């Protein structure tokens, strides 16, 4: 029961670059609950995955588990990474990003996180519009509003990403917008959609490459991961 | 040369290595982690009959390289793009002396590019001049995430990088191959960001910047920059083997590159010995954009010829035998 709660909490931790939960990606190697103590081991597709993203996921995991009302001690360990020692020391001491990486850290990872939230939004926007264009080749994408989108997981995903960026989720709001929620001029529509497509392809490509590498590195990982 | 269906393809493999990752050359755990990461790439993306035993993968030597590329692999000319990785390997990862000796023995088949690291500052600059002279350099391979002391990477727009690139202009080193890796200071930023390539491409218009792995994992940022900078090129190292495991994804990558960059600025490479060229060449010649991907035009034989060899041959001044050239000249 507590274990299930802990797993569910970890569902909220996303790989910022792949925009998917670490539980889906099978990055959680093990989770043990012993009274109020939770111990989680994380693993990544390669020893050289970016240390900043590795740290973000590990510290987010610690945060969501610590926020559960019944946890007293949360231990998150990152296994088999080139920066495992550094990151695990930082996590154990609650040293924060700057305390963990010292001289390699300047301010915070907020801006980095924002960049990838924006990419995730761009990709979700493209998925929704492309699906609609497939059905109706005459569609004028720059006039399409959120209310024009069919109910379903793609639209839900787009709305969640808009929320994460603080963008308008009103049904009358335009779908094709920039990172601040401003619609693009009609004449820019083709190039903006094209670029959004390459963002989506890049994210999807990275995701299936990472899943494949994780499976190669850890053959016991879930078959579908 | 590779021939299929009455068409002949001149093959230039623009990114190969002769590495030594055996335990006796490993300096620390990171040397093992690095080659294990490569081996996982190899195991994950290769067709089963092409898999190498781990022991062979650690070190394969010049004789095997010649066989895999030129006897079995259809390659007409290949270019060494060495990574030094001095923080992980005692004698470096790429084997300079062995590779250069091989290139000197087979100048018609092999070009040796060397690497530099701007963090060696003045001493490294002087070394670059000696290297340019000794190796007859036309190109260099830069790994911006190379560790050195407390530093875990540099950027192309750092002041010392500029001085090295100025030296390249002066020394006739025109082709700058750039590989991005995961650890550049500060960690607040995206280490795979290609914005520094954009900057130097604008400031050094007489140099070619070949971004290896076509900017992956930041394909979109790379394409955006390459559209605006005519001297930015895509190297297909690592992207190629997706043709086997993820052909639809490969179609999207090549479709995007052809759309944003055009057919003259894409270079084939096997990234040997990450993968061997034989199966990559065969499959690329057989490859077509799936019919349901109507967003991309079909890829033509003429485009394949450029990608497989004519583009890199034009960049490096490699002579293409009569009858194997492009119908429309490559624009460099």
Image: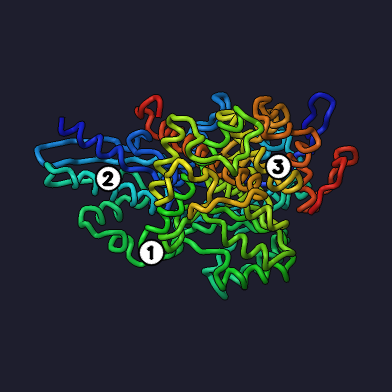
**Chain that bears disc 2:** A
State the mark number for residue A134.
none
Q: The residue marked by circle 3 belongs to what chain?
A: B
Residue A42 % position (x, y): 30, 41
Category of crowding for the residue at label 3, using alpha-carbon neighbours closer than 10 angstroms: few (below 14), some (14–19), many (at least 20): some
Q: Is residue B253 left or right of residue B186?
A: right
Chain letter of disc 1?
A
Instruction: Name the quadrant of the C terminus of chain A.
Output: top left
Label 1 vs 2, first from the N-terminus: 2
Residue B243 visible in the displayed image: yes
* Residue located at (15% from left, 29% from top): A1
| Mark 3 lies on residue | B258
Question: Where does label 1 land, which residue?
Answer: A104
Q: Quadrant of residue B275?
A: top right
Q: Nearer the viewer, residue A99 or B4?
A: A99
The quarter of the picture where residue B304 lies is top right
Of all residues shown, which one is farthest toward the left? A35
Is residue B242 visible in the rendered image? The answer is: no
Mark nearest the camera among 3 and 1 is 3
Residue B238's x, y, as percent? 58, 41
A119 above or below B127? Answer: above
- Residue identified by numbered label 2: A61
Q: Mark 3: which secondary structure?
A: helix
């Amino acid at each position: 029961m507590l274990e299930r709660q802990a797993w569910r909490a970890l569902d909220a931790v996303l790989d910022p670059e792949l925009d998917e939960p670490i539980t889906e990606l099978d990055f959680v190697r093990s989770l043990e609950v012993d009274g109020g103590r939770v111990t989680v081991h994380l693993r990544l597709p390669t020893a050289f995955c970016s240390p900043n993203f590795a740290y973000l996921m590990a510290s987010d995991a610690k945060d969501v588990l610590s926020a559960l009302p019944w946890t007293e001690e949360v231990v998150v360990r990152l296994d088999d990474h080139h920066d495992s020692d550094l990151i695990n020391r930082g996590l154990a001491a609650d040293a924060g990003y700057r305390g963990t990486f010292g001289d390699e850290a300047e301010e915070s990872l907020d801006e980095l996180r924002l960049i990838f939230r924006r990419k995730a939004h761009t990709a979700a926007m493209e998925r929704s519009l492309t699906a609609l264009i497939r059905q109706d080749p005459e569609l004028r994408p720059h006039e399409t509003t959120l209310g024009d989108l069919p109910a379903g997981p793609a639209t839900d995903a787009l709305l969640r990403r808009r929320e994460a960026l603080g963008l308008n989720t009103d049904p009358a709001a335009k779908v094709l917008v920039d990172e601040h929620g401003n619609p693009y001029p009609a004449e820019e529509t083709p190039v903006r959609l094209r670029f959004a497509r390459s963002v989506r392809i890049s994210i999807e490509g990275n995701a299936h490459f990472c899943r494949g590498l994780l499976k190669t590195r850890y053959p016991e990982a879930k078959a579908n991961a | 040369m590779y021939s299929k269906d009455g068409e002949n393809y001149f093959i230039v493999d623009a990114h190969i290595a002769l590495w030594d990752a055996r335990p006796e050359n490993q300096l620390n755990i990171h040397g093992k982690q690095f080659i294990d990461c490569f081996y996982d790439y190899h195991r994950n993306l290769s067709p089963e009959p092409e898999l190498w035993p781990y022991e062979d993968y650690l070190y394969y030597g010049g004789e095997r390289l010649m066989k895999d590329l030129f006897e079995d692999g259809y390659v007409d000319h290949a270019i060494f793009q060495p990574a030094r990785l001095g923080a992980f390997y005692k004698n470096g990862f790429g084997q300079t002396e062995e590779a250069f000796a091989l290139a000197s023995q087979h100048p018609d088949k092999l070009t040796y590019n060397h690497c530099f690291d701007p963090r060696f500052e003045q001493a490294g600059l002087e070394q670059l001049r000696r290297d340019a002279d000794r190796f007859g350099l036309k190109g260099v391979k830069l790994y911006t995430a190379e560790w050195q002391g407390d530093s875990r990477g540099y950027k192309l727009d750092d002041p010392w990088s500029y001085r090295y690139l100025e030296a390249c202009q002066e020394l006739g080193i025109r082709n700058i191959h750039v590989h991005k890796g995961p650890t550049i200071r500060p960690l607040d930023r995206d280490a795979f960001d290609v914005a520094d390539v954009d900057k130097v491409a604008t400031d050094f218009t007489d140099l070619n910047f070949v971004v290896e792995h076509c900017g992956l994992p930041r394909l979109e940022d790379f394409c955006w920059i390459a559209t605006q900078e005519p001297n930015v090129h895509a190297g297909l190292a690592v992207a190629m083997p997706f043709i086997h495991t993820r052909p639809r994804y490969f179609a999207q990558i090549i479709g995007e590159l052809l759309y944003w960059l055009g057919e003259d600025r894409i270079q084939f490479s096997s990234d040997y010995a990450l993968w061997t060229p034989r199966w990559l060449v065969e499959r690329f010649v057989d490859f077509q954009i799936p019919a349901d991907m109507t967003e991309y035009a079909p890829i033509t034989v003429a485009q394949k010829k450029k990608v497989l060899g004519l583009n890199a041959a034009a960049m490096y001044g490699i002579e293409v035998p009569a009858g194997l050239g492009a119908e429309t000249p490559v624009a460099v």
